[in-house]
Amino acid sequence: MFFQETPPDTSIYMIAGYAVFFIVMAVYLLSLFIRSRNLKRDLTVLEDMQKEGNKPMKTKQKSVTQK
């Protein structure tokens, strides 16, 4: 009859779909990790710049001698 044929085996496509999904998610998580690390580095640089900006600047004055 009509329904005596077996359905095609699509397990390969399911495994490939899961593999693609996990690879994409791994790349996304790696991207988030790298962005987070770069933001932390930028934050420390900005905090250091702010600390240096709050300190009074020591200017070197040249002594002028007249001959």
Image (cartoon, rainbow, N blue to C red):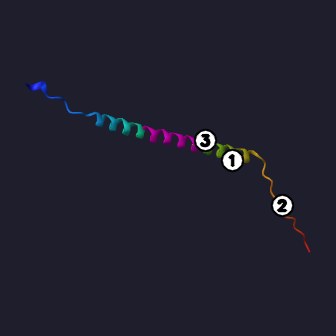
Q: Which residues are magenta?
A: 25-38
Q: Could you tell me which residue is drawn at 14 percent across and 28 percent down?
A: 5
Q: Does 34 sit above or below residue 11?
A: below
Badge 3 amino acid: Lys
Badge 2 amino acid: Gln
Badge 1 amino acid: Met
Q: CA distance from mark 2 to mark 1?
A: 24 Å
Quarter holding the C terminus? bottom right
Q: Nearer the viewer, residue 13 or 34?
A: 13
Query: Which residue is label 2 attached to?
Result: 61
Give residue 50's position: percent from left, percent from top. Answer: 69, 45
Query: Which residue is label 3 attached to?
Result: 40
Give residue 27's position: percent from left, percent from top. Answer: 45, 42
Nearer to us: label 2 or label 3: 3
Q: CA distance from mark 2 to mark 3?
A: 38 Å
Numbered disc 1: secondary structure: helix
Query: Which residue appears farthest toward the bottom when viewing the image?
Result: 67
Nearer to us: label 2 or label 1: 1
N-terminal of the pair, mark 2 or mark 1, is 1
- What number is the disc on residue 49? 1
In the image: residue 46, left or right of residue 67:
left
* Residue 40 sits inside the magenta stretch: no
Q: CA distance from mark 1 to mark 3?
A: 14 Å
Marks 2/1 in contact by CB < 8 Å: the verdict is no
Q: Does 60 sit above or below residue 65?
A: above
Give residue 20's position: percent from left, percent from top. Answer: 37, 39
Nearer to us: label 1 or label 3: 3
Quarter holding the N terminus? top left
